[in-house]
Amino acid sequence: MTDGDPAETRLRLTILGGYLGSGKTTWLRHQLHVGGFGPRVHVIVNEAAEVPVDDALLQGAEGITLLAGGCCCCEGRAGLIAALRELCDARSRIPADQPRLRHVVLETSGLADPGAIVAAIQGDPVLINHILLAETVVAVDALHALAQLRTEPLGRRQIAAADRLVLTKADAADPAALAALRATLAVLNPHATVSASSLGEEVPLLPLPPDAQPVHLPPLGPEDERGPIRPTQLAIPLDLDWSAFTLWLSALLHARGDDLVRVKGVVRTPAGRLLLQTVRKVVQSPEILPEQSDGRHDDVIVFIGRGYRPEDLGRSLRRFLGVV
Ligand SMILES: [Zn+2]
């Protein structure tokens, strides 16, 4: 989790996703217990059905909101937007130099697509200015995920939306099955970081054996018949014309947004190092990153998607920038 620029005043939001029974709550409880989100955290729990919230969750959180009016990526979306606006409102009434709410963690229902939640927040004219999407963490059940991924498009969408994948129950998994799962996750989402946990506590993850093979995931309906999701890395010229680049990216997302699952990278601009991210057709407002102490350049953007040839992306950008 990057801490970003000290001048960053937006309320940070972590979206916690994962399939039903993937161990989200256990992981969250432990993170709150050890202060993993820093001080002044509010938790929003979305349950697709009305279930009493575990009181133990409250330890380490400043407040808790239960959203039980349906899954907040779809029918419960308005409730989520209202709850977040309320938190932003209450926070903006406190002067910035006073201790005020710093972080919100949204525990989604197991049926939620985190990408749809990100799009809903970015599409809200109020929230887009007050919330910084810090991270999407997706819990992956090390024992059952492979079976789910074979049959569940939702599980695949959850994986694809993650910045960080946490393999839960990792210590109980057979090493060969765990290696196959990790290789499969790397195909579904090559850019996410992967860690492992047991009862919420981080456990070490051995390097992935070089011979680990992803399992074959059968296509599941029209959205999966357009070929596999693949990463494409694009080096960004150091003297990039930033406004031309954002124009190109907007045009690309407009034309190919359904194929581009995710765009993420760091670009050097006159304003500093910007972390650039998109989910679906939405470009998030860029986050300013601190300068790297070793002066290393990291001007690379990763495109994750399907239905286009990797070389076409670079050609299109160069043509747009006039550097064919
Ligand atoms: Zn939903």
Image (spheres, rainbow, N blue to C red):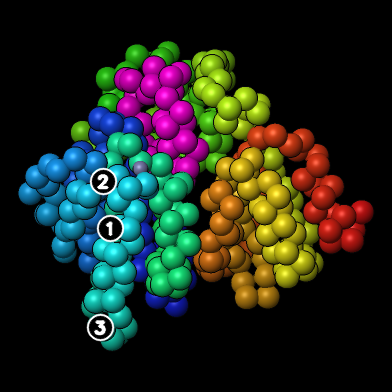
Whether residues under marks 1 and 3 lie with C-beta atoms below 8 angstroms apart, the answer is no
Q: Horizontal placement of 104 versus 113: left or right? A: left
Precedes in sequence: disc 1 or disc 3: 1
- Closer-to-camera residue (75/190): 75
Mark number displayed over residue 79 = 1
Give the residue displayed 61% in from the left and 43% down from the top: 258
Using the rendered image of the protein, determine whether residue 178 is visible from the camera's viewpoint.
no
Whether residues under marks 2 and 3 lie with C-beta atoms below 8 angstroms apart, the answer is no
> What stretch of residues is rendered in magenta?
137-166
Query: What type is the residue that disc 2 sits on?
Result: Gly
**Residue underneath mark 3:** 94
Query: What type is the residue that disc 1 sits on?
Result: Gly
Q: Is residue 159 above or below residue 125?
A: above
Residue at the far front in the pictured view:
75
Precedes in sequence: disc 2 or disc 1: 2
Give the residue displayed 46% in from the left and 28% down from the top: 153
Precedes in sequence: disc 2 or disc 3: 2
Q: Horizontal placement of 77 versus 49: left or right? A: right
- Label 2 C-beta lies within 8 Å of the nearest ligand 1 atom: yes
Quarter residue 137 falls in: top left
How busy is the neighbourhood of tag 1: few (under 14 within 10 Å), some, or many (20 plus)? some
Q: Is residue 59 above or below residue 7?
A: above
Which of labels 1 and 3 is toward the front? Answer: 1
Quarter residue 293 falls in: bottom right
* Image location (x, y in percent) of residue 65: 18, 58
How busy is the neighbourhood of tag 2: few (under 14 within 10 Å), some, or many (20 plus)? many
Q: CA distance from mark 1 to mark 3?
A: 24 Å
Query: What type is the residue that disc 3 sits on?
Result: Ile
